[in-house]
Image (cartoon, helix red, strand yellow):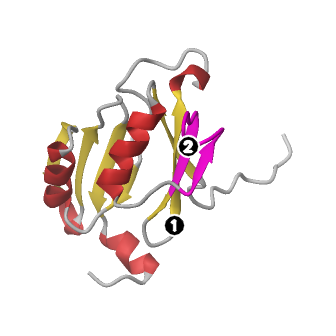
Amino acid sequence: MPDTMPITLRGLATVTLWADDVAAARAWYAGALGVEPYFQRPDAELPAYVEFRIGDHEDELGIIDRRWAPPGLGQPPGGAVVHWHVDDVAATIAALEARGATVLMPLTVREAGFVTAAVQDPFGNILGLMHNPHWLEKSGAAE
């Protein structure tokens, strides 16, 4: 079989989460992230999709009405665990728990300075948290 061009994953474009109540999820994430969404459709009154830009690289976090989830998508919690870099995993867990998240994977100290955990938001989505020295090095951020 001839070689084909390899698929190159260049980085996250948008991380998509699902919610039955997009307006409630928008409010929860705006409070947790400290920013308002920059994009909402069809409108802010009855959103079916909202999108936030967050972090040093303004990564996109989208929340979509669960009615439009792919057929066969499992019930929450589910999906891939996307780990977001945070400076302090324990403090982030505490802040998210105070907003109603529950710990799904407890804080785990790993080798070489890596620390991981995951929480489940009130809408059934999983948020992975990671202190990642490699991310800091590649992003040019100081520890």
> What is the residue that sits farthest to the top in this orientation?
72
Q: Earlier in the sequence, mark 2 or mark 1?
A: 2
Question: Measured from the top left, where is residue 58 in percent x and y?
Answer: 51, 66
> What is the residue that sits farthest to the front in this orientation?
45
| Range drawn in magenta | 38-52
Residue 80 in view of the camera = no
Q: Secondary structure at mark 1?
A: loop
- Pointer 1 residue: 58
> Residue at the spot x=71%, y=51% of the render?
7
Viewer-nearest of discs 2 and 1: 2
- Residue 95 placement, left or right of 24: left
- Within 10 Å of disc 2 (Cα), the crowding (few <14, some 14-19, many 20+) is some
Image quarter hosting the C terminus: bottom left
**Tag 1: amino acid:** Glu
Residue 120 in view of the camera = yes
Question: Measured from the top left, where is residue 137 in percent x and y?
Answer: 38, 79
- Pointer 2 residue: 44
58 above or below 96? below
> Residue at the spot x=33%, y=43% of the render?
28
Image quarter hosting the N terminus: top right
Between marks 2 and 1, how big is the CA–CA gap?
Answer: 21 Å
Question: Measured from the top left, where is residue 126 in percent x and y?
Answer: 34, 37
